[in-house]
Image: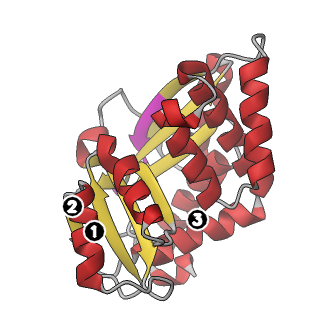
Amino acid sequence: MSGHSKFANIKHKKAKNDAAKGRIFTRLGKELMVAVKEGGPDPNNNSKLRDVIAKAKSNNMPNDTIERSIKKAAGDASAANFTAITYEGYGPNGTAIIVETLTDNKNRTASNVRNAFTKGGGNVGTPGCVSFMFDKKGQILISKDECKMDADDLMMLAIDAGAEDFSDEDDDAYEIITEPDNCGTVRIALEEAGVPFLQAEVTMIPQTWVDLTGEADIKQMNKILDLLDEDDDVQEVYHNWNMPEEDEE
Protein backbone atom coordinates (compact mmCIF):
# COMPACT_ATOMS: atom_id res chain seq x y z
CA MET A 1 0.00 0.00 0.00
CA SER A 2 2.95 2.25 -0.78
CA GLY A 3 2.09 5.93 -0.91
CA HIS A 4 -1.43 5.42 0.40
CA SER A 5 -2.09 7.38 3.58
CA LYS A 6 -5.13 6.27 5.58
CA PHE A 7 -5.06 9.56 7.47
CA ALA A 8 -4.91 11.59 4.25
CA ASN A 9 -7.83 9.58 2.89
CA ILE A 10 -9.98 10.27 5.93
CA LYS A 11 -9.06 13.97 5.68
CA HIS A 12 -10.11 13.88 2.03
CA LYS A 13 -13.44 12.31 3.00
CA LYS A 14 -13.96 14.80 5.82
CA ALA A 15 -13.27 17.74 3.52
CA LYS A 16 -15.87 16.54 1.06
CA ASN A 17 -18.29 15.87 3.90
CA ASP A 18 -17.86 19.37 5.29
CA ALA A 19 -18.65 20.78 1.85
CA ALA A 20 -21.88 18.80 1.77
CA LYS A 21 -22.72 18.38 5.45
CA GLY A 22 -26.45 18.37 4.77
CA ARG A 23 -26.15 15.25 2.61
CA ILE A 24 -24.00 13.50 5.21
CA PHE A 25 -26.47 14.25 8.01
CA THR A 26 -29.34 13.03 5.80
CA ARG A 27 -27.54 9.73 5.27
CA LEU A 28 -26.75 9.35 8.94
CA GLY A 29 -30.38 10.14 9.78
CA LYS A 30 -31.47 7.27 7.53
CA GLU A 31 -28.99 4.92 9.20
CA LEU A 32 -30.28 5.97 12.63
CA MET A 33 -33.87 5.38 11.48
CA VAL A 34 -33.07 1.90 10.18
CA ALA A 35 -31.20 1.00 13.37
CA VAL A 36 -34.09 2.19 15.58
CA LYS A 37 -36.67 0.27 13.52
CA GLU A 38 -34.59 -2.89 13.72
CA GLY A 39 -33.64 -2.80 17.40
CA GLY A 40 -35.46 -0.01 19.24
CA PRO A 41 -34.47 3.51 20.37
CA ASP A 42 -32.32 2.58 23.39
CA PRO A 43 -28.63 2.39 22.41
CA ASN A 44 -27.90 0.41 25.58
CA ASN A 45 -29.99 -2.43 24.18
CA ASN A 46 -29.29 -1.84 20.49
CA SER A 47 -25.66 -2.31 19.48
CA LYS A 48 -26.30 -1.30 15.87
CA LEU A 49 -27.79 2.01 17.00
CA ARG A 50 -24.85 2.51 19.36
CA ASP A 51 -22.44 2.06 16.44
CA VAL A 52 -24.36 4.46 14.18
CA ILE A 53 -24.40 7.09 16.96
CA ALA A 54 -20.60 6.78 17.24
CA LYS A 55 -20.30 7.13 13.47
CA ALA A 56 -22.55 10.21 13.55
CA LYS A 57 -20.45 11.82 16.28
CA SER A 58 -17.22 11.14 14.36
CA ASN A 59 -18.83 13.05 11.46
CA ASN A 60 -19.56 16.00 13.81
CA MET A 61 -23.32 15.48 13.85
CA PRO A 62 -24.67 17.49 16.83
CA ASN A 63 -26.04 15.49 19.76
CA ASP A 64 -29.44 17.18 19.60
CA THR A 65 -29.73 16.29 15.89
CA ILE A 66 -28.92 12.67 16.70
CA GLU A 67 -31.50 12.61 19.50
CA ARG A 68 -34.17 14.17 17.28
CA SER A 69 -33.54 11.57 14.58
CA ILE A 70 -33.89 8.74 17.08
CA LYS A 71 -37.11 10.16 18.58
CA LYS A 72 -38.57 10.72 15.12
CA ALA A 73 -37.80 7.16 14.07
CA ALA A 74 -39.21 5.73 17.31
CA GLY A 75 -42.42 7.75 17.17
CA ASP A 76 -43.27 7.66 13.47
CA ALA A 77 -44.65 4.27 12.48
CA SER A 78 -45.48 5.60 9.01
CA ALA A 79 -41.91 6.71 8.29
CA ALA A 80 -40.44 5.45 5.04
CA ASN A 81 -39.05 1.95 5.09
CA PHE A 82 -35.62 1.85 3.48
CA THR A 83 -34.20 -1.17 1.71
CA ALA A 84 -30.45 -1.79 1.70
CA ILE A 85 -29.09 -2.58 -1.77
CA THR A 86 -25.43 -3.01 -2.69
CA TYR A 87 -24.10 -2.44 -6.19
CA GLU A 88 -20.71 -3.54 -7.48
CA GLY A 89 -18.88 -2.44 -10.59
CA TYR A 90 -15.77 -1.25 -12.34
CA GLY A 91 -14.23 2.14 -12.91
CA PRO A 92 -11.35 3.12 -15.21
CA ASN A 93 -8.47 0.63 -15.58
CA GLY A 94 -10.40 -2.10 -13.76
CA THR A 95 -10.75 -0.24 -10.47
CA ALA A 96 -13.25 -1.97 -8.18
CA ILE A 97 -16.15 0.00 -6.69
CA ILE A 98 -18.77 -1.04 -4.12
CA VAL A 99 -21.81 1.19 -3.55
CA GLU A 100 -24.03 0.71 -0.49
CA THR A 101 -27.47 2.34 -0.66
CA LEU A 102 -30.58 2.78 1.47
CA THR A 103 -33.60 3.50 -0.69
CA ASP A 104 -37.38 3.74 -0.75
CA ASN A 105 -37.38 3.57 -4.56
CA LYS A 106 -35.27 0.76 -6.03
CA ASN A 107 -35.80 1.80 -9.66
CA ARG A 108 -34.62 5.36 -9.01
CA THR A 109 -31.54 4.19 -7.15
CA ALA A 110 -30.57 1.59 -9.75
CA SER A 111 -30.91 4.17 -12.53
CA ASN A 112 -28.85 6.79 -10.69
CA VAL A 113 -26.05 4.38 -9.79
CA ARG A 114 -25.81 3.06 -13.36
CA ASN A 115 -25.79 6.62 -14.66
CA ALA A 116 -22.87 7.53 -12.37
CA PHE A 117 -20.82 4.58 -13.57
CA THR A 118 -21.66 5.19 -17.24
CA LYS A 119 -20.81 8.90 -17.15
CA GLY A 120 -17.41 8.03 -15.66
CA GLY A 121 -16.65 5.39 -18.24
CA GLY A 122 -17.32 2.50 -15.88
CA ASN A 123 -20.01 -0.15 -15.63
CA VAL A 124 -22.11 -1.87 -13.00
CA GLY A 125 -21.40 -5.58 -12.70
CA THR A 126 -23.16 -8.55 -11.15
CA PRO A 127 -23.41 -9.02 -7.37
CA GLY A 128 -20.12 -10.40 -6.07
CA CYS A 129 -18.07 -9.30 -9.07
CA VAL A 130 -15.66 -7.18 -7.00
CA SER A 131 -16.53 -7.72 -3.33
CA PHE A 132 -14.14 -10.68 -3.17
CA MET A 133 -11.33 -8.12 -3.63
CA PHE A 134 -12.22 -6.51 -0.29
CA ASP A 135 -12.24 -7.66 3.35
CA LYS A 136 -15.15 -6.57 5.55
CA LYS A 137 -13.53 -5.32 8.74
CA GLY A 138 -13.95 -2.89 11.57
CA GLN A 139 -11.46 -0.05 11.08
CA ILE A 140 -10.53 2.49 13.75
CA LEU A 141 -8.22 5.37 12.86
CA ILE A 142 -6.54 7.45 15.57
CA SER A 143 -4.56 10.62 14.93
CA LYS A 144 -1.02 10.31 16.28
CA ASP A 145 -1.00 14.03 17.06
CA GLU A 146 -4.15 13.82 19.17
CA CYS A 147 -3.43 10.54 20.96
CA LYS A 148 -1.52 10.96 24.22
CA MET A 149 -1.18 7.21 24.87
CA ASP A 150 2.06 5.38 24.12
CA ALA A 151 1.81 3.26 20.95
CA ASP A 152 2.58 0.00 22.78
CA ASP A 153 -0.03 0.73 25.46
CA LEU A 154 -2.59 1.63 22.79
CA MET A 155 -1.87 -1.61 20.94
CA MET A 156 -2.29 -3.71 24.12
CA LEU A 157 -5.53 -1.90 24.97
CA ALA A 158 -6.91 -2.61 21.51
CA ILE A 159 -5.77 -6.24 21.39
CA ASP A 160 -7.11 -6.95 24.89
CA ALA A 161 -10.47 -5.47 23.81
CA GLY A 162 -10.68 -7.82 20.83
CA ALA A 163 -8.77 -6.17 17.96
CA GLU A 164 -7.01 -8.49 15.54
CA ASP A 165 -4.37 -6.10 14.19
CA PHE A 166 -2.65 -2.82 15.06
CA SER A 167 -0.49 -0.74 12.74
CA ASP A 168 1.54 2.42 13.26
CA GLU A 169 3.14 2.38 9.79
CA ASP A 170 1.23 5.46 8.63
CA ASP A 171 3.03 8.69 9.50
CA ASP A 172 -0.11 10.39 10.79
CA ALA A 173 -2.45 7.72 12.14
CA TYR A 174 -2.66 4.47 14.05
CA GLU A 175 -4.92 1.87 12.45
CA ILE A 176 -6.79 -0.78 14.43
CA ILE A 177 -8.48 -3.63 12.56
CA THR A 178 -11.20 -5.80 14.07
CA GLU A 179 -13.70 -8.40 13.01
CA PRO A 180 -16.95 -6.57 12.12
CA ASP A 181 -18.77 -7.72 15.27
CA ASN A 182 -15.92 -6.57 17.54
CA CYS A 183 -15.60 -3.00 16.23
CA GLY A 184 -18.08 -1.57 18.73
CA THR A 185 -16.47 -3.36 21.67
CA VAL A 186 -13.00 -2.07 20.82
CA ARG A 187 -14.34 1.44 20.17
CA ILE A 188 -16.02 1.50 23.60
CA ALA A 189 -12.76 0.38 25.27
CA LEU A 190 -10.94 3.25 23.57
CA GLU A 191 -13.66 5.75 24.54
CA GLU A 192 -13.48 4.63 28.18
CA ALA A 193 -9.69 5.13 28.10
CA GLY A 194 -10.14 8.64 26.70
CA VAL A 195 -8.63 7.86 23.32
CA PRO A 196 -10.00 10.14 20.55
CA PHE A 197 -10.60 8.57 17.15
CA LEU A 198 -11.09 9.90 13.65
CA GLN A 199 -13.13 6.98 12.41
CA ALA A 200 -14.60 3.84 13.94
CA GLU A 201 -16.84 1.86 11.64
CA VAL A 202 -17.25 -1.35 9.70
CA THR A 203 -15.83 -0.85 6.23
CA MET A 204 -14.60 -2.67 3.14
CA ILE A 205 -10.79 -2.70 2.95
CA PRO A 206 -9.19 -3.45 -0.44
CA GLN A 207 -6.80 -6.39 -0.56
CA THR A 208 -4.81 -4.63 -3.30
CA TRP A 209 -4.75 -1.08 -4.63
CA VAL A 210 -4.90 0.17 -8.23
CA ASP A 211 -2.91 3.18 -9.47
CA LEU A 212 -4.40 5.48 -12.11
CA THR A 213 -1.71 7.31 -14.05
CA GLY A 214 -3.62 8.72 -17.03
CA GLU A 215 -5.25 12.12 -16.60
CA ALA A 216 -8.40 10.91 -18.39
CA ASP A 217 -8.72 7.88 -16.08
CA ILE A 218 -8.34 10.06 -12.98
CA LYS A 219 -10.94 12.51 -14.29
CA GLN A 220 -13.41 9.70 -15.03
CA MET A 221 -12.89 8.05 -11.64
CA ASN A 222 -13.51 11.35 -9.88
CA LYS A 223 -16.65 11.80 -12.00
CA ILE A 224 -18.05 8.47 -10.80
CA LEU A 225 -17.23 9.21 -7.15
CA ASP A 226 -18.62 12.76 -7.30
CA LEU A 227 -21.92 11.64 -8.87
CA LEU A 228 -22.33 8.88 -6.29
CA ASP A 229 -21.50 11.33 -3.49
CA GLU A 230 -24.26 13.66 -4.69
CA ASP A 231 -26.91 10.89 -4.62
CA ASP A 232 -28.96 10.91 -1.42
CA ASP A 233 -29.68 7.17 -1.76
CA VAL A 234 -25.97 6.34 -1.57
CA GLN A 235 -24.69 5.68 1.94
CA GLU A 236 -21.13 4.50 1.38
CA VAL A 237 -18.74 4.04 -1.53
CA TYR A 238 -15.68 1.78 -1.31
CA HIS A 239 -13.00 1.51 -3.98
CA ASN A 240 -9.44 0.32 -4.47
CA TRP A 241 -8.05 3.40 -6.21
CA ASN A 242 -4.74 4.35 -4.59
CA MET A 243 -5.48 8.07 -4.57
CA PRO A 244 -2.34 10.20 -4.95
CA GLU A 245 -1.43 12.53 -2.10
CA GLU A 246 -2.23 15.69 -4.03
CA ASP A 247 -5.84 14.52 -4.52
CA GLU A 248 -6.22 13.87 -0.79
CA GLU A 249 -5.02 17.16 0.58
Q: Residue 175, image x and y in percent?
A: 33, 70
Mark 1 against mark 3, which lies toward the viewer?
1
Residue beneath the point at 73% across and 44% down: 66
Q: Amino acid at mark 1?
A: Leu
In the image, residue 229 lies at what x, y percent? 65, 50
Residue to which mark 1 is pinned: 157
As drawn, 182 above or below 111:
below
Determine the secondary structure under disc 3: helix
Any magenta on residue 149?
Answer: no
Number of the label disc, if any, that sits on residue 173: none
Q: Which residue appears at 46% of the width and 39% of the height?
A: 123
Q: Which residue is mark 3?
A: 13
Q: Which numbered disc flags the more N-terminal residue, 1 or 3?
A: 3
Where residue 161 appears, as percent x and y from the top left, is 27, 57
- Are circles 3 and 2 on residues that touch, CB within 8 Å? no
Q: Pointers 1 and 2 in contact (CB under 8 A)?
A: yes
Is residue 1 visible in the rendered image? The answer is no
Most prominent secondary structure in the magenta stretch? strand
Quadrant of the snapshot with the C terminus: bottom right
**Magenta part of the chain:** 86-93
Going by the numbered disc 2, the residue's amino acid type is Asp
